């Protein structure tokens, strides 16, 4: 057994962790993925302070990046108008922190317009049970004013399934009926993606996902044009944005804690997520490579070399490649001349550069016949620095 095995391993682990923030690790970018697997150049997720959950007595608080449409304050009625052509003030009322439908006064809509979102809304049907089927505690949440997620008191109240609470009305019934009794608060959490068309062609039908009181009832349900009453809808383009509407269906349904979070664009809509178009991927890779080359310009020595090598994973650049390979060859030439009793002090640097060269040649970002690689591998072999394979199941 080799002496100093533990300190050597510790040094190696430290070196690996410090190496250019995880560069030369997971599979490199490809035609539709601008980032490598486990790529630390990928932007960190945006920090959001979470809110709190509601109880029957008290509404919860929204997350820090939510846009509040109704949080219980009387003046928030100003965020809503009657959904009549003249956009007059609504006659719906705010009482005790609750927004209540005044039957006969008409739908309301937000002044604000938006599209893809996570929407949270809580509602309560009248505790005095009146009517049945579609006549009991009926309202509705209309995303972009067009797609109704049904609000209906279906507690012990059957109706046509594609019109029951949390149905995409006229499109798809909920998968379950997790409603609480009338008078209690029901919680809808909705994920909405609008349809996307280009030149009259549907690129994405749009989708809705709904949780009712924490139970999944719509799982990425395609919009099929948005649905409606009696008639089968067919796919159609949506505008870029629209208001949120709430239905007056003749019942004094109450609402509270209404907020949304705008969602990042899908790749099909110009967004940067998972699988992107080849065109967008190439542009993004070029942008990342440029940033790394700019960082490299401010560095010296192996740091500069490794950054230039890293940039090649995103985009080839003749100048960067020439500089980096030349620096690696120079480094290897110097290392070859280090006397055997001093070479251990260079171990970290040698393994670091060799790791980069192994990665770059493995993925054919550089040709195999790099002099530096040959020379450094020879030193690693002579010094027996090759990390020993870890027992299976230990690494993640
Ligand atoms: Mg309705």
Image: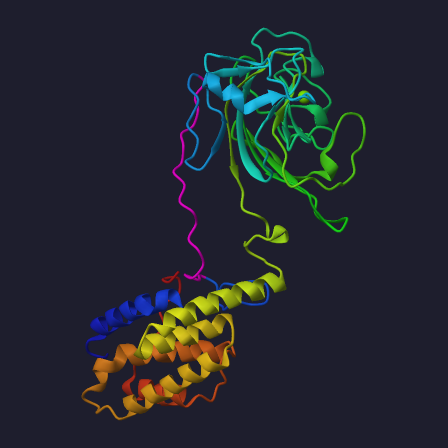
Q: Is residue 258 left or right of residue 251?
A: left
> Residue 317 placed where, x, y %?
50, 78
> Residue 284 placed where, x, y %?
53, 63
Which quarter of the rendered picture does the C terminus lie within?
Answer: bottom left
Vertical relation: 348 (above or below) 151: below
Q: Residue at x 77, y 25 (%)?
A: 229
Magenta: main secondary structure: loop
Vertical relation: 49 (above or below) 106: below
| Residue 186 appears in the picture as rendered | no
Give the extent of the magenta segment. 38-56
Q: Residue at x 59, y 34 (%)?
A: 113
> Residue 48 placed where, x, y %?
41, 41
The quadrant in which residue 155 appears is top right
Q: Between residues 256 and 243, which one lies in front from this camera angle? A: 243
Look at the image and say whether residue 44 sits in the magenta stretch.
yes
The quadrant in which residue 388 appears is bottom left
Vertical relation: 112 (above or below) 89: below
Look at the image and say whether residue 324 sits in the magenta stretch.
no
Vertical relation: 364 (above or below) 167: below
């Amino acid at each position: 057994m080799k002496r100093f095995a533990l300190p050597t391993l510790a040094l190696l682990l430290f070196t690996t962790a410090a190496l250019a923030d995880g560069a030369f690790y997971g599979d490199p970018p490809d035609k539709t993925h601008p980032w490598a697997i486990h790529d630390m150049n990928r932007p960190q997720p945006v920090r959001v302070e979470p809110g709190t959950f509601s109880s029957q007595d008290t509404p919860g608080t929204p997350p820090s990046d939510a846009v509040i449409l109704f949080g219980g304050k009387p003046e928030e009625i100003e965020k809503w108008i009657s959904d009549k052509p003249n956009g007059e003030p609504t006659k719906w009322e705010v009482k005790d922190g609750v927004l209540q439908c005044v039957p006969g006064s008409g739908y309301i809509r937000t002044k604000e317009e938006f599209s893809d979102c996570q929407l949270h809304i809580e509602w309560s049907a009248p505790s005095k049970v009146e009517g049945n089927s579609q006549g009991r505690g009926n309202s509705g949440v209309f995303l972009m004013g067009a797609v109704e997620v049904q609000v209906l008191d279906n507690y012990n109240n059957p109706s046509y399934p594609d019109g029951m609470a949390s149905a995409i009305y006229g499109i798809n019934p909920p998968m379950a009926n997790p409603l609480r009794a009338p008078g209690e608060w029901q919680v809808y959490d909705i994920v909405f993606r609008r349809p996307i068309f280009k030149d009259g062609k549907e690129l994405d039908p749009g989708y809705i996902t709904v949780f009712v009181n924490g139970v999944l009832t719509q799982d990425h349900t395609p919009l099929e044009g948005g649905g409606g009453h009696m008639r089968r809808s067919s796919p159609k383009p949506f505008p870029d944005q629209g208001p949120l509407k709430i239905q007056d269906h003749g019942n004094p349904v109450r609402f509270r804690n209404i907020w949304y979070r705008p969602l990042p664009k899908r790749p099909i809509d110009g967004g940067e997520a998972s699988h992107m178009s080849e065109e967008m991927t190439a542009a993004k890779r070029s942008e990342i490579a440029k940033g790394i080359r700019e960082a490299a310009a401010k560095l010296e020595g192996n740091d500069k070399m490794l950054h230039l090598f890293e940039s090649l994973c995103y985009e080839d650049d003749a100048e960067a490649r020439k500089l980096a390979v030349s620096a690696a060859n120079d480094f290897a030439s110097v290392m070859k001349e280090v006397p055997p009793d001093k070479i251990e002090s260079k171990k970290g640097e040698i393994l670091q550069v060799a790791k980069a060269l192994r990665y770059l040649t493995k993925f054919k970002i550089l040709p195999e016949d790099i002099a530096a690689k040959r020379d450094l591998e020879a030193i690693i072999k002579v010094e027996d620095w090759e990390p020993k394979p870890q027992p299976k199941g230990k690494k993640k």
